[in-house]
Image (spheres, grey):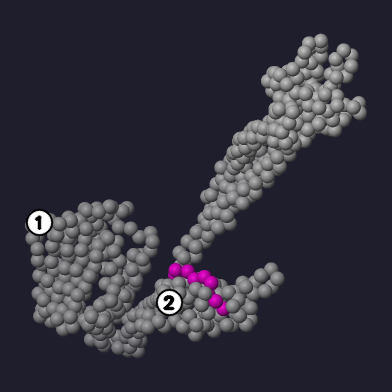
Amino acid sequence: MHKLKFRLVFAILSMTLLVMASLGLIIGQVYKNIYENHLTDRLMKEAELAAYTIESHEGDEIDEQLLASRMSERLDARVTIIAVDGTVLGESATDPSTMDDHYERPEIRAIREGRPEIEIRYSDTVNQELYYYAVPYEIEGTEAGYVRIGVATQTITNLNETIWWILAVSFTIAFVVIGTITYRIANEMIKPIENASEVAIELAEGNFKARTFEGKKDEVGQLTRSMNVLAYNLEQITKRHEAQQERLETLINNMGSGLIFINARGDISLINQRCHDIFQEDTNVWLNQLYHETIKFKELIKIVQAVFITEKRHREQITLVNGLDTKHFDIHAAPIMSEMGIMKGIVLVLHDITELKKLEQVRKDFVANVSHELKTPITSIKGFSETLLDGAMKDPVYLEKFLTIIYQESERLQSLIQDLLELSKLEQHYFSLNWGKADLTKITEDVVELLRPKARDKGIKLNLHGDTNARLEMDGDSERLKQIAINLINNAITYTPNDGRIDVSIISIKESIEFVVQDNGIGMEKAELPRIFERFYRVDRARSRNSGGTGLGLAIVKHLVEAHNGKLSVSSELGMGTTFKVIFIRNQQRKS
């Protein structure tokens, strides 16, 4: 842009210089012609005056030399008085006797020919070029001679030099002024264009915040305003695009499913953050890499290849084993087609259905366990009923024995159904506790006294520890807290052998209460600890079933503790016993 400014200034100054030079030549020549005309008139008039002066001395004795000298002083010019025959009578510049005959001098000859004119020639007498003009003079009516006036041409030369010097100085000043003004005007004109050009470059490089200075309301100002409007529109479009891009990236990266886009060349062009968790590696390095070189699961590669070949949607459930981690996925693969029907790539969606598979397995196990648990008492009831109907009822001993067994199995069946209904209720979303102030000390004392006969039948010592005089109150549902205590203590009695020991403790710790049930029963292996709160899970199935247990007690306890916002933990060692610990918060937000 600087080149444009300098070209503009150079063009204007060159034109100005040309015009001023031409104008200077014309003015100089005009002034020269004017002065020459003025000098010609002066020569003619001074020559006439000199002739008149000589003629005025008619009748007097004339000293031509003296007269020539005096007139020269008065006229500031060379004066020569010449006789008719060409003899020099008087000369202001030198001794006339030393001078040649002037009869054939051009200015004298011109008088004789009747055409007086100015002659210009070099004079050896005065060693310079002179303008000459001569006129005749008369004495007593007769032509007596000639008077010649000479003026040095140096006068014209000096005048021309003065004129040219003045013109040069004037034009130089004018040129500088014009150049300065031109530069400023050009700068004022070009600067907005330079700014607009710089802004255009910034816009081309993606900086849409760039703005140019808006000048006057002329064409350049209109250009800069248009540039700013363009920049603003591009900025807004970019902001909207970036916002849409950000929303899209946020949506893609926060999807619950993995998303992979593979272009038509087989390169992975897009992969979301969820894939990082699925494949358990930095999937960002997969970008712009061939899918079959980065994806290590053959099942996925086969799905992608199938879509590339058929150009049709494909859905399949697969299992991916990554180290010790096994996950199940529902894979949706679809081709991306252009309006012309050309495949642009493939989008791959990986929906993790591992939890659904686990829930499905839990459901199957639950149905199987319920069926098994119901089958046993029903089979017993049916079998003993058939035995009685076949004639055993006639024997009073067998009748009482079998009816007792039928009653016990009915009790067990009723207990199982009741626990199932209770567990189902606890798992409903609308389940809620009857909040109030609960005395955990009294609840525990009542449960211990309730179960003490059962423990005594097995010779088990059931001990309650803690300051029973200090009532430990908390926010909770008294009936549900009692249910927790019954299940935990009853579970300890079930798995503690005869002559064992069970310790129940209630401990106050700051804003919480610890409820602990510890026994020295059969215990369990650490591998079984995570599963003991599952429905129908039993450490010793025969012992539990013989004791009348349903296998749902600990599952119910887990739900009730969570409903009270408490924490349930268990520690155990095989053959050494088990300890259940529940931590309740004393004061908490009550829920209706």
User: Which of label 1 and label 2 is nearer to you?
Assistant: 2
Where is residue 563, by image quadrant? bottom left
The quadrant holding residue 107 is: top right
Q: Residue furthest top?
A: 59
- In the image, the segment drawn in magenta is 266-274
- Does the magenta segment cover residue 570? no
Would you place residue 324 above or below residue 117 in this image?
Answer: below
Query: Type of residue at label 1?
Result: Ala
Residue at 80% x, 22% y is: 147
- CA gap between label 1 and label 2 equals 56 Å
Q: What secondary structure is marked by label 2?
A: helix
Residue at horizontal 55 percent and vertical 57 percent from the top: 205
| Residue 225 appears in view | no
Residue located 16% across and 79% down the image: 577
Front position in the image: 227 or 71 = 71
x and y, in percent, of residue 241 in the image: 55, 56
**What residue type is disc 2 on?**
Phe
Residue drawn at (78%, 26%) of the image: 88
> Farthest residue toward the right?
113
**Which of 348 and 589 lies nearest the eye of the viewer?**
348
Mark drawn on residue 279: 2
- Side of 144 relative to 590 (left or right): right
Question: From what the image shows, is residue 429 above or below residue 138?
Answer: below
Task: Using the image, determine if residue 149 lies above or below residue 483.
Answer: above
Q: Residues within 10 Å of mark 2 (few under 14, many from 20)?
A: some
Relative image position of residue 227 (x, y in whole percent): 61, 47
Q: Mark 1 points at which residue?
A: 470
| Quadrant of the image occupied by residue 511 | bottom left
The relative height of residue 101 versus residue 362 in the rendered view (above or below) is: above
Residue 406 in sight here: yes
